[in-house]
Amino acid sequence: MKVILAYSGGLDTSVIIRWLKEKFRAQVIAYTTNIGQPDNPSKLKEKALGTGASAFFCEDLRDKFVTEYILPSLQADALYQEKYPLATSLSRPLIASGLVALARKEKADTVAHGCTGKGNDQVRFELAFRYLAPELKILAPVREWEFRTREEEMEYAQRYHIPVSTTKKKPYSIDWNLWGISIECGVLEDPWNEPPEDVFQITVSPKKAPAKGEVITIHFEKGIPVKLNGRTLSPREIIEKLTEVGGRHGVGRIDLVEDRLVGIKSREIYEAPAAVILHTAHKELERLVMSREMFDFKLSLAPWYSRIIYYGQWFSHLRECLDGFIRESQRYVSGEVRLRLIKGNCLVVGRRSPFSLYEEKLATYSQGDIFDHTAAKGFIQIFGLPAVLEGERWRKDQK
């Protein structure tokens, strides 16, 4: 059996290499991707090979991740249950496609992942595998092995001298990419507990953030960020800089009790400075340039798009159909949004666009007002006709 393992170097996948070799006498090839996490590929390679992998591959997918996954979700205003920017969820179909490509290249018959039996990632990986390569066998060791707790995994790792950063004092499970960080386990499993500061990786405490704050300006072209503070940058560069700037001001901390796909509630901590800033700015620009009906209709699609990502249905036809509408909806989403980052808050303080539907001469209550106030009486009579008829019916019903 030749297995391509989605390898992160964390507790689960570090133990999996040894376990697969013991259980199946498998040849294990470790596959990882650079999607913005701070891992050192050479150290990961050394660790994977030292743990028993026959080969190690690392693929830099940062630009692809931004262009093909992050930006479409930003244009769709995709926030799961109105808060989570879907950083981990978006990365899974990308990683799965890389695994499949490597499996074909290496003539492997099996792919494996380190997801738990009650998590969402198992669904995301396996739906992608089934869509892209249904002929491959799928192994999910964490669902099948004898370890019942992360503590037992740590003991196994210690017994076989497998180096892992997870400890009983810091048992957090951390997933990290360009779009954000997800953190779970340990004291976080009690939703009453305030997250200790040691769980946060890239954001300072709002209490310790600079009191003055900072004002930034983001320029969008058709819903895509292209400039930061007047400087033209690639979307990836903008995301990286906003992660740094937002983190410095404590922006992007999210504490969410969310509904997992498998039906249980889970308490998750997220750090996503760039995602929070860009989603805030993008939606504000849409408010400026979209008609009432267009904005409301697009807003109604955002939960659908979010669920598609969260539920692992990235490769579905429905997502492709929604993408067609969303791309067209961004035709006039160009302009600038100015934001103030201060003490954990991201506040919109200005917006402008050559395609703005805001007309100051209509909105003003000062000199220069061109709105025909006399037209309001007739408008109210027509618009209020159903209210009159319903009122008459109600009065008759009360007799």
Image: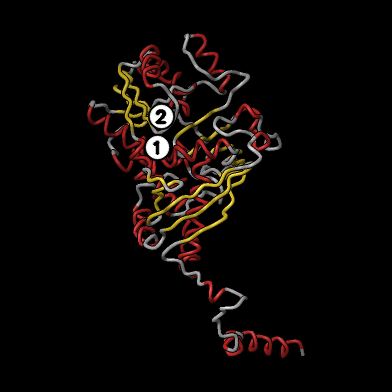
374 to 130, vertically: above or below: below
Color encoding of the figure: secondary structure
- The quarter holding residue 382 reads bottom right
Task: Residue at 44%, 30% (x, y): give it.
Answer: 37
Query: Is residue 264 in sight in this rendering?
Result: yes
Observer-nearest residue: 65 or 54?
A: 65
368 to 227, vertically: above or below: below
Alpha-carbon neighbours of circle 1 within 10 Å: few (<14), some, or many (≥20)?
many
State left or right for residue 370 relative to residue 93. Answer: right
Mark drawn on residue 113:
2
Mark drawn on residue 306:
none
Looking at the rendered structure, the secondary structure element under dot 1 is helix
Observer-nearest residue: 220 or 316?
A: 220
Residue type, mark 1 in image: Phe
Observer-nearest residue: 4 or 145?
A: 4
Question: Do labels 2 and 1 touch, CB within 8 Å?
Answer: yes
Task: Residue at 41%, 29% (x, y): give it.
Answer: 113
Alpha-carbon neighbours of circle 2 within 10 Å: few (<14), some, or many (≥20)?
many
Number of numbered markers: 2
Q: Name the residue at the right extreme.
A: 399
Quadrant (top left, top right, bottom left, bottom right) of the C terminus: bottom right
**Can you identify the residue that label 1 sits on?**
125
